[in-house]
């Protein structure tokens, strides 16, 4: 039981018989002395309501029915209006007065006692009522915690979205390429990410990643991965050295075998050459000369698993007009109501029609195609897309 | 997802039926980890009826491998469908795990 309910529980006794007060204090003197109960007395319904305002920590009301000014049944109606879920009322009525007892119960009394009061029975009733109040109290606290977690998640979502690039075009002065990307998390926060940054005046680093699992654990791992890759990538080292270094660091950080698949590339904006490492990620597509082709794998495995893994890079050269299209498996593995996957075929079919699209149109169009395909089926995985068109030297 | 657990000599054989997505990965992990807790050291996962695995599912395979190799146990996979094999190839898991074409090969440890 909560400390607040185990000790010094405030109980208000409402009765117009003034003799009751010393009697109760006498019978429960041990509990009062031990600080278990703390009694407050009122002599009619109106006085009881005033006391409740003055002492909002009253948890239990023990009320007579027949009283001047405001009787017990009216008091019950007023108490109900307070909508205080952990304030319970026990009614005391004349023996055999079933009509009033029924009315009291219907107005929300928790229990009743009959006169003459048996103090043993009273104590049992008080304790039983306090247990019920305690359960409600805990439930309310859990509810509050849940609300607070939801608010935290919302904040986490905002932070996560804030660390991903979100202003387009990101480099308005660069005309050699166009770039656009988008991440749609399946839950409040996701484990996918993308990033891009100018390493120097000529080279653009770009990355897409997918952390195992989703939700908060994946989001934290995502933030660490994204930050490590950006910080390492900005040093201007080769993609394979960058992946090797980040992998080592993530292996040290990885708890319970979390991992991340990453495609990291560096585009030389003067030549269109792309140096890249695929660390266990779905191969991106290259749209070139009316064809679509998968970017060759580099034999790399996921990051965060094998500490001494040696990553190898490959190179390809983009012709002016070519587009690189990177995605996470939330795209091709989206399910529809018939339990079919969107699949590589539909993705390739979409891309076959996308040669004339800008990166922004391709990314948005693909998301529309996948959400249209999935229909009412809830999104089961994060979806992330990144597209770059190389325009050639300006 | 359904699991069928049999014993074959020194090995426990777990046959996975259906999908290991994010939700089911949790059930899958606790079921197989409890096998290990009960003393199972050598484990083969038969993936013949496994038709989808998410990254959370792959993570569980890593957990199992780590647990078993930590106690000099054996962890092997067998009978991967082409789509699952492709996921393993893309992610580089094919180089991390011992994968066999049949149960017999997995039991013998010979590809």
Image (cartoon, coloured by chain):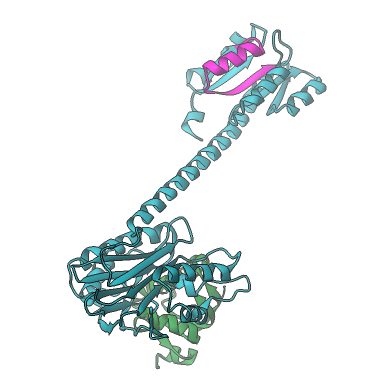
Asked if the stretch drawn in magenta spans residue A55, the answer is yes
Whether residue B51 can be seen here: yes
> Toward the viewer: A116 or A300?
A300
Q: Please, which residue is most extreme toward the top here?
A: A18
Query: Which residue sits at x=44%, y=75%?
Result: B40
Question: Which chain is green in the rendering?
Answer: B
Residue A218: image location, x then y, percent: 39, 61
Q: Report which colour depicts chain A.
A: cyan
Q: Please check the rendered image and state whether residue A350 is part of the magenta-colored stretch, yes or no.
A: no
Res. A258 in view: no
Which quadrant holds residue A200? bottom left
Q: Name the image quarter holding residue A314.
A: bottom left
Q: Residue furthest front?
A: A394
Q: Position of residue A278 (x, y in %)?
A: 32, 78
Instruction: Name the residue rendered at 59%, 12% in the picture.
Output: A41
* Along the line of sight, the residue nearer the viewer: A230 or A77: A230
Numbered range of the magenta stretch: A42-64
Q: Viewer-proximal residue, A50 or A191?
A: A191
Q: Residue A310: percent from the left, percent from the top? A: 23, 80
Query: Which residue is nearer to you in this view: A247 or B97?
Result: A247
Q: Is residue A92 left or right of residue A386?
A: right
Q: Image height check: is A209 above or below A114?
A: below
In the rendered view of the protein, which quadrant contains the C terminus of chain A? bottom left
């Amino acid at each position: 039981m909560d400390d607040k309910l185990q000790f010094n529980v405030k109980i208000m006794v409402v009765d117009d018989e003034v003799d009751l007060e010393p009697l109760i204090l006498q019978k429960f003197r041990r509990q009062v002395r031990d600080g278990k109960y703390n009694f407050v007395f009122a002599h009619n319904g109106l006085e009881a309501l005033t006391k409740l305002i003055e002492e909002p920590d009253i948890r239990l009301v023990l009320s007579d029915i027949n009283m001047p000014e405001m009787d017990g049944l009216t008091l019950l109606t007023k108490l109900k209006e307070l909508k205080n879920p952990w304030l319970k009322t026990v009614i005391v009525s004349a023996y055999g007065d079933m009509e009033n007892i029924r009315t009291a119960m219907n107005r929300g009394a928790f229990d009743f006692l009959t006169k003459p009061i048996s103090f043993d029975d009273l104590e049992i009733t008080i304790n039983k009522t306090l247990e019920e109040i305690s359960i409600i109290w805990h439930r309310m606290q859990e509810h509050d915690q849940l609300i607070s977690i939801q608010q935290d998640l919302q904040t986490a979502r905002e932070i996560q979205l804030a660390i991903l690039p979100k202003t387009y075009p990101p480099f308005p002065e660069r005309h050699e390429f166009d770039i656009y990307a988008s991440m749609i998390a399946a839950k409040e926060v996701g484990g996918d990410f993308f990033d891009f940054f100018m390493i120097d005046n000529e080279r653009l680093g770009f990355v897409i990643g997918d952390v195992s699992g989703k939700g908060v654990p994946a989001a934290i791992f995502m933030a660490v991965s994204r930050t490590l890759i950006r910080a390492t990538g900005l040093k201007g080292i080769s993609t394979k050295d960058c992946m090797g270094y980040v992998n080592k660091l993530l292996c040290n950080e990885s708890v319970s075998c979390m991992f991340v698949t990453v495609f990291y590339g560096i585009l030389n904006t003067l030549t269109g050459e792309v140096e890249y490492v695929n660390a266990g990620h779905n191969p991106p597509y290259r749209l070139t000369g009316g064809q679509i082709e998968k970017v060759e794998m580099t034999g790399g495995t996921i990051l965060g698993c094998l500490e001494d893994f040696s990553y190898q890079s490959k190179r390809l050269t983009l012709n002016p007009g070519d587009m690189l299209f990177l995605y996470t498996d939330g795209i091709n593995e989206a399910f529809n109501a018939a339990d079919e996957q969107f699949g590589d075929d539909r993705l390739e079919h979409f891309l076959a029609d996308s040669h004339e699209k800008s990166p922004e149109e391709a990314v948005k169009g693909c998301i529309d195609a996948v959400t249209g395909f999935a229909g009412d089926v809830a999104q089961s995985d994060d979806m992330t897309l990144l597209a770059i068109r190389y325009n050639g030297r300006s | 997802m359904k699991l069928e657990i049999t014993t074959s000599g020194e090995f426990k054989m777990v046959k996975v039926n259906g999908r290991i997505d994010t939700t089911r990965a949790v059930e899958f992990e606790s079921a197989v980890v409890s096998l290990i807790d009960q003393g199972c050291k050598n484990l083969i996962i038969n993936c013949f009826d496994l038709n989808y695995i998410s990254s959370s599912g792959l993570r569980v395979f890593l957990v199992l491998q780590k647990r078993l190799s930590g106690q000099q146990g054996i962890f092997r996979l067998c009978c991967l469908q082409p789509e699952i094999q492709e996921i393993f190839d893309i992610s580089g898991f094919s180089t991390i795990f011992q994968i066999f074409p049949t149960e017999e090969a997995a039991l013998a440890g010979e590809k």
